[in-house]
Amino acid sequence: MGLFDRHAGLVDIYRDIRSTGIDPFQIRMERVLSPTEAIINGRKTLLVGTNNYFGLTFDPSCMEAAIEAIRAEGTGTTGSRIANGSYSEHVALEEEIADFYGKKHCMVFTTGYQANLGVISTLVGAEDFLLIDADSHASIYDACKMTQAEVVRFKHNDPSSLEARLRRLGDKPGNRLAVLEGIYSMLGDSAPLKEFVEVCKRYKAYVLVDEAHSMGALGEHGRGLCEKAGVLDDCHFIIGTFSKTLGAIGGYCVSDEPDFEVLRVATRSYMFTASLPPSIVASVRQALRIVRARPELRTKLWDNVATLYDGLAAQGFKLGPEHGPVVGVHLPDRMTAIGFWRALLEAGVYVNVAVPPATPNGVSLLRCSLCAAHTCEQLEHMIEVMTGIGRQMGVIAAAPRLRAVGARI
Amino acid sequence: MTDAVQVNGAVSRITVMREIGRHLEPFRVGDRPITGMTVISKDLTVDSLAVMDMVLELEDRFDVAIPMNVIAEIQTVDQLADTVLTLSARR
């Protein structure tokens, strides 16, 4: 058996996808013009699939901070914080994030993926139990492979399913750690966190919440679902990323656990990779200031969510279960999703296409993510374009609809 | 779902096999029946995620906990049934 034979199934699927004449996983952004526009295939294209929730990638103050940091401290740290030491700015960033959440400790990571991978796999070990949502992000599943803990999966967003599993563990010794996400990245739905936290309290399980897609978007101060659900103090670990609302790259974990700092010398994805470069740290610090100072960006984001979600629902599209900065549009199968995605790109609108095996329950989706910088006109244009393609492809009813009554949903 | 044939409170093998068969039915290839010897990942069109989803259902149906690392080592329908029965008996 050859090295690549094990990927034969994937090779077949990928070949099918590319047979449509375009490869959705190798899109080239010839030039990025703004948080909402880029040149793709020589054409100015509306971006509605970049997780750039506040549109801060082109914020002049964030860009200036990054440029200044490069001039002052160079382009990179060329090593990990364990080996090369921390820059003052790494420490300042950690203090600022901890302060943002009102937590005692914060560790920053070079990517959000590494934050999940490292923290989750290091917190639990042999004889412990890791309880994860069935629709968890790949970084959480990968963390499961790196721990000796027993991994138990519960039904997506179902606190009673978690409770049944905690109950079945009975009086077995070992810590229990439940991992939840603020907003799930494919369908944009939120965890019923208050209910989950109640279950965890009853069974003395630790709670870890990944707020990658909800930091900035949810909560009165943008702290995420933990804040919105009023359970900030009950969540033992909050993980997040700098690569979405904060417009750069990196990850973090905050906590009040007294011995938290030991993770710096125990977490391999923190210890054995180069630390964030000064420019990223500087732009993230500025972006965090903006999140704190400009709540109107959150309002604008949710206005845009409502425009797109309600607009598509009114045309009969089958969407994720609730409003969220990610709007998942269900399509019947993989090739329809690819075809729709391609037609949309050719019409000048870029979204993500998500197909099995990367999606829960084998669903095929167009994954749209909103930005505070989108204009109402841009989104209305997108709805019009999607409606045209949807009718042509027979995905939605051909006749104009007055109101979505769920007949096709 | 109270059709489980129970002897002294224990779940019968037939019940477990029938339940597994019901979940795997949509993934059958052609006319090949599902037997205890069926290798789940090879003889059927089911992917690993769907297997884990089936295990979620089996866990709730038979009130057992089957950790992911145990699932990873299960190959045949017989082995899956044995796992459920063993865990169920241990309760």
Image (cartoon, rainbow, N blue to C red):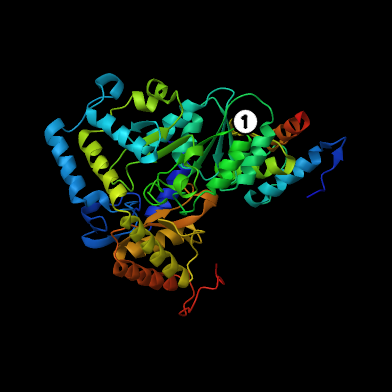
Residue A40 visible (yes or no):
no
* Quarter occupied by residue B78: top right
Front in this rendered view, residue A226 or B14: A226
Vertical side of A180 occupied by A220: above or below: below
Question: What amino acid is found at the position of numbered circle 1 in the picture?
Answer: Val
Q: Is B90 situated left or right of A63 in this image?
A: right
Front in this rendered view, residue A407 or B52: A407
Which residue is depicted at the point 68% across and 27% down?
A: A171
Residue A106 at x, y = what percent?
Answer: 37, 32
Which residue is depicted at the point 17% across and 33% down?
A: A75
Residue A224 at x, y = what percent?
Answer: 42, 47
Vertical side of A143 occupied by A290: above or below: below
Residue B27 at x, y = what percent?
Answer: 63, 49
Residue A376 at x, y = what percent?
Answer: 31, 68
Which residue is depicted at the point 76% across and 45% down?
A: B18
Q: Is A301 situated left or right of A76 in this image?
A: right
Where the C terminus of chain A falls, by quadrant? bottom right
Vertical side of A298 occupied by A79: above or below: above
Q: Chain of mark 1?
A: B
Q: Name the residue tied to disc 1.
A: B70
Quick one: which residue is furthest to the left in this view?
A: A71
Front in this rendered view, residue A77 or A394: A77
